[in-house]
Image: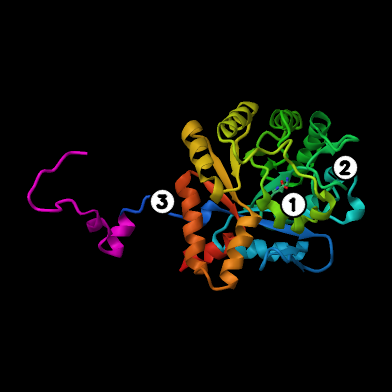
Amino acid sequence: MPQIISSEFPLIRKRRNRYTASIRSLLQETVLTTKDLVMPVFITDDSVDCPIASMPKIKRLTINSLLKECEELLRLGVIAIAPFPNVNNQHKTNDGVYATNPDGILPKALREVKKRFPEMLIFADIALDPYTSHGQDGIIDEEGYILNDITVEMLIKQALICAESGADFVAPSDMMDGRVQKIRENLEKNGLINTGIMAYSAKYASSYYGPFRDAVGSTANLGKSGKHNYQMDCANSDEALQEVALDIQEGADIVMVKPATIYLDIIQRVKTQFAFPTAAYHVSGEYAMLEAAFANNWLDRDKIILETLTSIKRAGADFTFTYYAKDAAKLLQR
Ligand code: PBG
């Protein structure tokens, strides 16, 4: 900074650039748009939509409702969804093999959405937790330890089914080692060279996923078990860079940091270090926390939504998975 010596104080007034709304908008560094938003959606094979207690205003949708939701999202300028299934308990097994069933609720939903709205981008979650009787993301041994390599074998089949059913990106959220490479190889082998991989690379073992587990129905199955021997410790930051580096090497097209607002430092480090397409996930607990405050009129809903999502983008996220995608799009249209 040049030093300005003067008897007049102050010559430099940073507030000049904030004087009017026009000047402020001219100089705005981060501009949030609807293209920054991906809407996670829950789907059910029940015949009616079903509310989720810990996620006010969010419902598990039937395929028909999902199609209506897609229509509305596209009208609002939101061009991407991330569907998550709540499958009936009768389909859940130790190995989560229902994840590879082409007639399962998720592949069915992917085909329907792609048929009606080919322009809608779809991120299909790759992990076994909605399909396992124990709620873990992988296959477990007698001690309950999640087995890496046989889980990966299942994941590559799940990814192939999702890709064949119309997913633009498969999104492994399981945190098994080496899965990005194996998924990539299998997609190539099957000619799906343009299906991308968005890797949940720096995914923390976060307690902010609680409401999501209610939504996909894995809370009770998971019981008191945690996911700490595959998801990351919230105390670690260098390790996130190692995970991201590996996923890029293995062929990921996009990497993700999750959760978002309490991990803005990780988003920024990842973006700065790799200059690679980087997504963030504003997760269910971050949503639930804000909803609780909004319900009490403790925070201004509209302003907080935009401030939150702008901050995630400012930290370095190219786009954000957020349950506020629709709300934010409506606010941005005004
Ligand atoms: C499943 C998965 C989870 C989320 C996305 N994919 C939960 C978990 O890992 O337990 C969380 C999303 C959210 O909380 O909104 N592997």
* Disc nearer the start of the sequence (2/1): 2
Question: Which quadrant of the rendered structure holds the C terminus?
Answer: bottom left
Q: Amino acid at mark 3?
A: Thr
**Counting other residues with Cα less than 10 Å from the Cα at mark 2, is it few (<14), some (14-19), or many (20 or more)?**
some
Which mark's residue is nearer the viewer, 1 or 3? 3
Q: Is residue 4 above or below residue 252?
A: below
Horizontal side of 298 relative to 54 (left or right) equals left
**Counting other residues with Cα less than 10 Å from the Cα at mark 1, is it few (<14), some (14-19), or many (20 or more)?**
many
* Residues at marks 2 and 1 touching, judged by CB atoms closer than 8 Å: no
In the rendered structure, which segment of residues is drawn in magenta? 1-26
Q: Amino acid at mark 1?
A: Leu
Q: Secondary structure at mark 2?
A: helix
**Counting other residues with Cα less than 10 Å from the Cα at mark 3, is it few (<14), some (14-19), or many (20 or more)?**
few
Give the label on residue 30, or none.
3
Q: Amino acid at mark 2?
A: Val
The residue wearing badge 1 is: 110
Q: Quadrant of residue 58?
A: bottom right
Give the alpha-carbon distance from disc 2 to disc 1, as whole Å: 18 Å
Give the label on residue 285, or none.
none
* Residues at marks 1 and 3 touching, judged by CB atoms closer than 8 Å: no
Give the alpha-carbon distance from disc 3 to disc 2, as whole Å: 43 Å
Residue positioned 61% across, 67% down in the render: 292
Q: Quadrant of residue 241?
A: top right
Give the alpha-carbon distance from disc 1 to disc 3, as whole Å: 33 Å
Q: Position of residue 323 (x, y in %)?
A: 62, 59
Q: Position of residue 210 (x, y in %)?
A: 71, 54
Judge whether residue 24 is colored magenta.
yes
Horizontal side of 13 relative to 59 (left or right) equals left
Q: Nearer the viewer, residue 225 or 47?
A: 225
The residue wearing badge 2 is: 97
